[in-house]
Amino acid sequence: MEKRKPMETHIGKEIIILSNLIKRRMRSASEALGVTDTQARVIQYISEEGKKREIFQKDIEDTFCVRRSSVTQIIQLLERDGYITRESVERDARLKKLVLTEKGSQIDKVMKKQIKDMEAELKKNISPQEKETLINILYKVRKNLGEEN
């Protein structure tokens, strides 16, 4: 890759390019497992958050900022394909918590390895100090855009 003069570089453009490269790589990894990248992210969310508390459809809607109808479709496909189950909760039979199956846990395990490998690749040839500087700069950029989380 050719080195650019700092004044010629547009931060937003570079972030979009990096984002697209990462998404493409992760999409390819999830599709090789037979799930979409969105399904893989939902599986990972259920896996991680499900260790702390019960997960419901509303949690997916809120976390991913996705409409109810879209989340319903995602959940129905994940259930149909055997990655999750919906289970009633004792306190309210109308509520159905989302639980990973063994098949879903396997997808989660493989995707976590893919993420770990991707992170290692991203950090290659970057010193710990450079990484810290990059993270601080990216945080500032997010803050500039009004998104601090």
Image: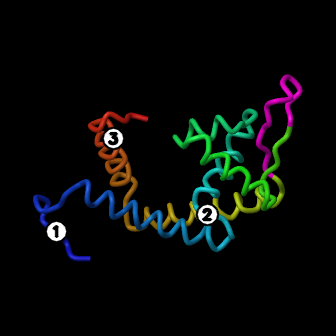
**Label 3 to label 2, Cα distance in Å?**
27 Å
Query: Label 2 belongs to which residue?
Result: 36
Q: Nearer the viewer, mark 1 or mark 2?
A: 2
Could you tell me which secondary element the residue under label 1 belongs to? loop
Q: Which residues are magenta?
A: 88-100
**Label 1 to label 3, Cα distance in Å?**
23 Å
The picture quadrant where one finds residue 62 is: top right
Residue at 85% in and 31% down: 89
Quick one: which residue is furthest to the front in this view?
A: 69
Could you tell me which secondary element the residue under label 3 belongs to? helix
**Label 1 to label 2, Cα distance in Å?**
35 Å
Which one is in front, 29 or 131? 29
Residue at 37% in and 59% down: 127
Query: Label 1 belongs to which residue?
Result: 4
Residue 73, image x and y in percent? 66, 51
Q: Count numbered badges in the picture.
A: 3
Q: Residues within 10 Å of mark 2 (few under 14, many from 20)?
A: some
Mark 3 vs 2, N-terminal side: 2
Quadrant occupied by the N terminus = bottom left
Mark 1 vs 3, N-terminal side: 1
The kind of residue on which mark 1 rests is Arg
In the image, taking residue 33 as reference, residue 5 lies left or right, namely: left
